[in-house]
Amino acid sequence: MSAKGVDGRTVVLTGASSGIGAHAARQLADRGATVCLIARREDELEQVRTEIEATGGTAHIYAVDLTDTAACDAVAAELLAEHPVIDAIVNNAARSIRRPIAQATDRAHDYERTIAINYLAAVRLTLALVPRFVEQGQGHVVVSSTLSTQVPIPLFSAYLASKSALESFARSLTAELGGQGVTSTIVHFPMVRTEMSSATSIYAAMPMMAPERAAGWIVKAVDRRPARVSRLGGIAGEIAMSAVPGVTTWLTRPFFRRMDEQLSRRTRS
Ligand SMILES: NC(=O)c1ccc[n+]([C@@H]2O[C@H](COP(=O)([O-])OP(=O)(O)OC[C@H]3O[C@@H](n4cnc5c(N)ncnc54)[C@H](OP(=O)(O)O)[C@@H]3O)[C@@H](O)[C@H]2O)c1
């Protein structure tokens, strides 16, 4: 059997209780995957499982705080014991913080709590599965990241640093283990209408991708195993940031400032 495809696969998906993750769980299950769903809110996970089972799919749920290292190790052991083959893990659980660096000078904990879930928990869970992936001769690691690591948007330094670290880990994984069938995909989502983006009130006025559509990007990552899923604009931004980072940052700074001003005006009116 080719390593690609969704039907018949067992996929571990974190952050499956809401937003993009909940939709991805349903879409993967609709396409024949057995999904192992992880998040803290058990009732929400139970709801996703009920919906999947109602349409004939198979879902297992694991209610756990992934930043609790003992609980993370325990859930990894449970997954390995319960599922003889695990084909992919989607590291999608995350938190975001929007705060200017100048207002975070006494808030090092912002950086600690974003990195705890967005990077360290994802790495911890993935590392636990790597020996199984190598033993199987195949395994795929998807990481949910953002367009804003391609062209950095101001005010999200803690969040973006944690996502860049996760991307770097994913790239190293393919570089080191790709020859043994273990690969990764970085998914660069644009703004998506979910609980996470709704936390910033001015974003209510911003056009955003629907979470169902964003979930399709995760399905694509699991199905086809590309190195990256991104908009062309994100790739162009990455090229500009690599070639002329100073100029690109200088040009985008007023653009982002105007965007925030316009959104604030629209939210007030
Ligand atoms: N929305 C956007 O505009 C956007 C843009 C770019 C990238 N992304 C990325 O897309 C992914 C999904 O985000 P979303 O927009 O769908 O947000 P969301 O609805 O807030 O989902 C976040 C998920 O992470 C889980 N989670 C958070 N902390 C956790 C913890 N300590 N342990 C276990 N699970 C935890 C949450 O579940 P519990 O609360 O139940 O634990 C929830 O299921 C994230 O990686 C995000 O960074 C989103």
Image: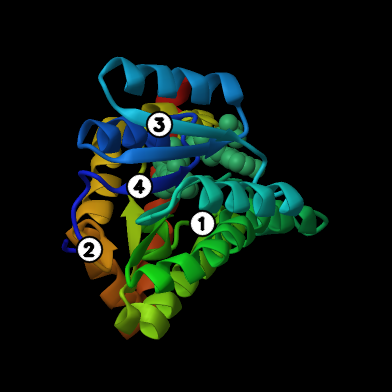
The front one of 78 and 230 is 78
- Residue 265: image quadrant is top left
Depth check, front residue: 161 or 85: 85
Q: Amino acid at mark 4?
A: Thr
Q: Earlier in the sequence, mark 1 or mark 3?
A: 3
Q: Which residue is mark 1?
A: 154
Q: Is mark 1 within 8 Å of ligand 1?
A: no
Q: Mark 4 falls on what kind of element?
A: strand
Q: Residue at x 62, y 56 (%)?
A: 121
Q: Secondary structure at mark 2?
A: loop
Q: Which residue is mark 3?
A: 59
The answer to whether mark 3 and mark 2 are in CB contact below 8 A is no
Q: Residue at x 29, y 27 (%)?
A: 57
First along the sequence among labels 2 and 1: 2
Circle 4 residue: 10
Amino acid identity at mark 3:
Ala
Left or right for 118, reference 239: right
